[in-house]
Amino acid sequence: MIFLDLLIGFLEVGLFSFGGAYAAIPLIRDVVLAHGWMDEDMLSYMIAVSESTPGPIMVNLATYVGSNKGGLLGAVIATTAVMLPAFFIILFIVVISRSLLKNPFIQASMRGLKSCVVGIILATGVYMILGNCYIMTKGSVDYAAIFITCVLALLYFGSRKVIKKGLSPIGLICLAAVTGMIVYGI
């Protein structure tokens, strides 16, 4: 039964996630929590681990959840299920793309999807920041997390103003890791 649940759950994620992995995080969260595969804290940790390991976040999360719940076969099923819809959609788009992409209605719908994806990613970021800044049991604010977030935002947007180019995502991830080790390690 777990294998069928993994297949259906991650097929849903693969079918209905537009805009990449960050936009898929709320959908993955809903599927994982609805099935009781992980609790909220463990899922947040796995999102962080999936962001820092090579490969797409959505695939990394599917592989971990599948492995955790169904061993090697569960990992294969969840990973395949999350990738199959995108594979077939891209295959379909390549076949019909020349004529479709010139259609003004298709162009307008793609522009509309872009704004939706930006909103979903922004909402996910705000949700994760707020979820990680408050300790639910004590209700206190984690000022170190707010400090690190502000420093990274200032560095990123400041670098865009000064050198007209933002810091690379890899540089930001490394800087966040070092800053977290310094702040929380001391």
Image (cartoon, grey):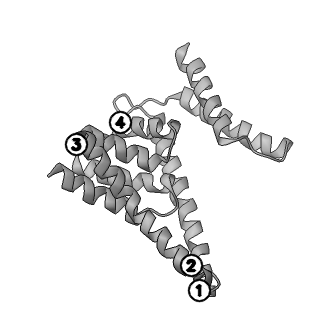
Identify the residue under disc 2. 109
| Mark 2: amino acid | Ser
Determine the CA span between mark 3 and mark 2: 39 Å
Q: Is residue 38 visible?
A: no
| Mark 1: amino acid | Phe
Q: Secondary structure at mark 3?
A: helix
Q: Are marks 3 and 4 in contact (CB under 8 Å)?
A: no
Residue at 70%, 41% in the rendered image: 168
Q: Is residue 16 left or right of residue 8?
A: right
Tell me: residue 66, above or below residue 141.
Answer: below
Q: Secondary structure at mark 2?
A: helix
Identify the residue under disc 4. 41
Identify the mark at residue 105; answer none if there is no mark. Answer: 1
Closer mark to the observer between disc 2 and disc 4: 2
Q: Nearer the viewer, residue 48 or 124?
A: 48
Q: Is residue 121 left or right of residue 77?
A: right
